[in-house]
Amino acid sequence: CIDWTAPVDLGAHPDYILVSDGIWVTDIHEPLTNTLGKLAGPQTKVLIAYESREFEDEAKFMALWGSRFRFHDIKPADQDEMWQSDDIFLFEGMLKN
């Protein structure tokens, strides 16, 4: 578990970073994006999963995240049917070159 406002140096870039239900607190959008940018390497995949609560706040986070990462949504057809939910959204991103 990482404190997004006080990231640690992992010494190496992980293959994956999972952010689960981590964007609903708008005060951490910028620290979260900055920390992801520091932790991710060129091959790191960042997976973000969240329950939709406030579309405008989510859109602001995606715009901020998109300034440093290229990303796409993971469509329901590409998800395990058992774990899908209409109000849970999944995204995969990587650092921009």
Image (spheres, rainbow, N blue to C red):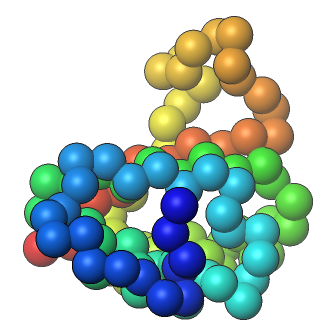
* The quadrant where residue 86 appears: top right
* The quadrant where residue 17 appears: bottom left
Residue 80 in view, yes or no: yes
User: Which one is in front, 53 or 14?
Assistant: 14
Q: Residue at x 47, y 50 (%)?
A: 18
Q: Residue furthest right?
A: 53
Above or below residue 3? Residue 50 is: above
Residue 72 place in picture, x, y as percent: 42, 50
Residue 6 place in picture, x, y as percent: 49, 88
Q: Is residue 41 left or right of residue 17?
A: left
Residue 92 place in picture, x, y as percent: 41, 48
Above or below residue 6? Residue 83 is: above
Image quadrant holding the C terminus, namely bottom left
Residue 84 place in picture, x, y as percent: 70, 23
Q: Residue at x 65, y 11 (%)?
A: 81
Total marks placed: 0
Q: Residue at x 55, y 88 (%)?
A: 5
Residue 63 in view, yes or no: no
Q: Is residue 45 left or right of residue 65?
A: left
* The quadrant where residue 38 appears: bottom left
Above or below residue 47? Residue 96 is: below
